[in-house]
Image (spheres, rainbow, N blue to C red):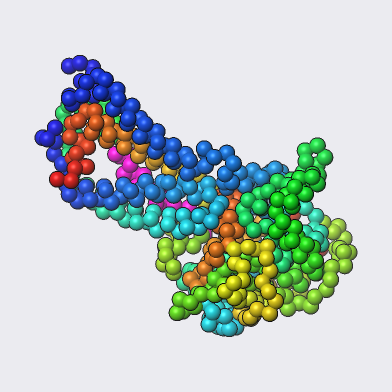
Amino acid sequence: MSTQARFPAASRLLHWLMAPMIVVMLFIGVGMAASISPRYELLVSIHRPLGIAIFVLCLARIVNRFIKPPPELPDTVPSLQRFAAKASHVVLYALMFIMPLVGWGMLSAARYPIVLYGPLRLPPILPHDLTLYAWLRNLHTDLAYLFFATFLVHFGAALFHGLIRRDGVLESMASWQ
Amino acid sequence: MSMKRFWFGAGPVGNAGVLVRLGAIGAVMLSVAGAFAYVGGWLSPVRLTQDRMMVAFQDANGIHAGFRRNHAKGVCVTGWFESSGQAAALSKAAVFRPARVPVVGRFALAGGMPFQPDAPATVRSMALRFLLPGGEEWRTGMNNIPVFPVNSARGFYEQLLASSPDPRTGKPDPIRMSAFLAAHPEAGRALSLIKKRQVTSGFANSTFNSLNAFRFVDAAGASVPVRWSTVPVQPLAADSAEPSAAGAKNYLFDDLIAQIAQHPLHWRLIVTVGQADDPTKDATLPWPAGRQQVDAGTVTIDHAASEDGGRCTDVNYDPLVLPSGIEPSDDPLLSARSAAYARSFALRAGEEHEKPPSAVSAREVQAGGNS
């Protein structure tokens, strides 16, 4: 298991920086969409800038992945698991990229000012259109559930590699040495 | 290669160990999923969520696709705000510098029934969207009552349930209403103030109040609690209870449209500055008389349009859309209103293609409000 190559340092840094941001984001999102309590305003005010921060880091991460490709999975991993790993990573990258854009786009279509902090705002990226807003608003929710489900599978698979297969895949991302 | 080794790898874990570890992984995943479900409100049937608030509106008013869940009957207006510059010392918001900004507004009647007949006692509202230079906005919804009947989202929800028609009689159950008032003494006190208000002859000579408190922040970062009102320049006239237009169903809106067609209407934007111990988180409580009042400028309304095609229709008058220089107070109703408005807005946006024409139709506005 010690023969498994590790992820490049920049990849590990980006992964562990973004992992908590994304998990927190998903919990804030599902919480604020249900909330009518005084927490709502706080959650919304975190959700917008955090989403944009994830988007910016996601761009850096895509560039980094091309410059420094991740290590291959060990040969011992069966092809079905190999396929699941590839597919889930494609979905995770796609969602990291699309979710902030859908959020930004839906606020644009509703003509909400897109406030990041204080007077700092983003310009609208879509026309003022209620039907478009309704569609994007639903898409944002559906993709969030898909994101959470994919995260959960990713998390479970990491534990599966670390605790059961013990093939060094978890350590390739999660070791400190 | 054994099946076990194929699927679970070659790690030094026995059969029993694999099962225990699989169970542990399953338990961890289930806990994370459970936490997500808890935060989303699915495990808490009594927690008041946006969805449950919308269901309460639907139970109280029926389903009216494409309309706002509250303040459903309305008309769009446009005009401008001319700042006096006098509030600029209290708030750094660009809207208070001496200048003119465009305004897109909406006059409406409280309640979720878009075709209710106009009546003097129905709460009237004025919503304004100030379009500040540089893309900032200030949105506010104000009512012609001195205080809000409840001081929490829960109170609002319970009032809505208590005032919903009983399926057997088609009328609200007085027993439920008195149970609500017993559980919410603040609502009883507020309602008696609301009943005592002067009801004027129309929208044009009504005073509209923000009800919730906000904070004005000046250029140095110091903040004061405020409430604001739009006070009509049009002369007051008590409601004659005699609808002016034949047909009467939309008499308040028809009068407003006819008046705007004759000449622009004006309201002074009066900011009331609270003192340190004035209640900011309880909208049922009036502030003591004699508080400092600042005349921030004049709102002028010179054009009316039906919601069908009007510029207010695609706008959510979310009270938390504020420019830099105006901040929310600790009033829990601000978050509640913002959250409920957002959900109402998303629902009606999705129903846009099913929406029937509004009560105040484009033809009615064109006819000068007298159709």
Q: Is residue B364 left or right of residue B301?
A: right
Seen in the picture, residue A10 relative to B366 is either above or below; the reply is above
In the image, B222 versus B294, the foreground residue is B222
Q: Is residue A41 left or right of residue B148?
A: left
On the image, the x and y values in percent for residue B319 come to 58, 62
On the image, the x and y values in percent for residue B76 come to 67, 63
The N terminus of chain A, quarter of image: top left
Q: Quadrant of residue B166?
A: top right
**Is residue B306 visible in the rendered structure shown here?**
no
**What's the magenta bit mostly, secondary-structure-wise?**
helix
Seen in the picture, residue B119 relative to A160 is either above or below; the reply is below
Q: How many marks?
A: 0
On the image, the x and y values in percent for residue B302 come to 68, 73
Q: Residue at 45%, 59% (x, y): give it.
A: A45
Seen in the picture, residue A82 relative to B233 is either above or below; the reply is above
Q: Quadrant of residue B362?
A: bottom right
Q: Residue at 64%, 43% (x, y): give it.
A: B55
The C terminus of chain A, quarter of image: top left
- Residue farthest along the top direction in this orientation: B2
Instruction: Judge whether residue A93 is colored magenta.
Output: yes
On the image, the x and y values in percent for residue B172 come to 79, 46
Q: Which residues are magenta?
A: A89-111
Instruction: Judge whether residue A129 is colored magenta.
Output: no
**Is residue B343 visible in the rendered structure shown here?**
yes
Q: Residue at 46%, 79% (x, y): give it.
A: B219
Seen in the picture, residue A149 relative to A108 is either above or below; the reply is above
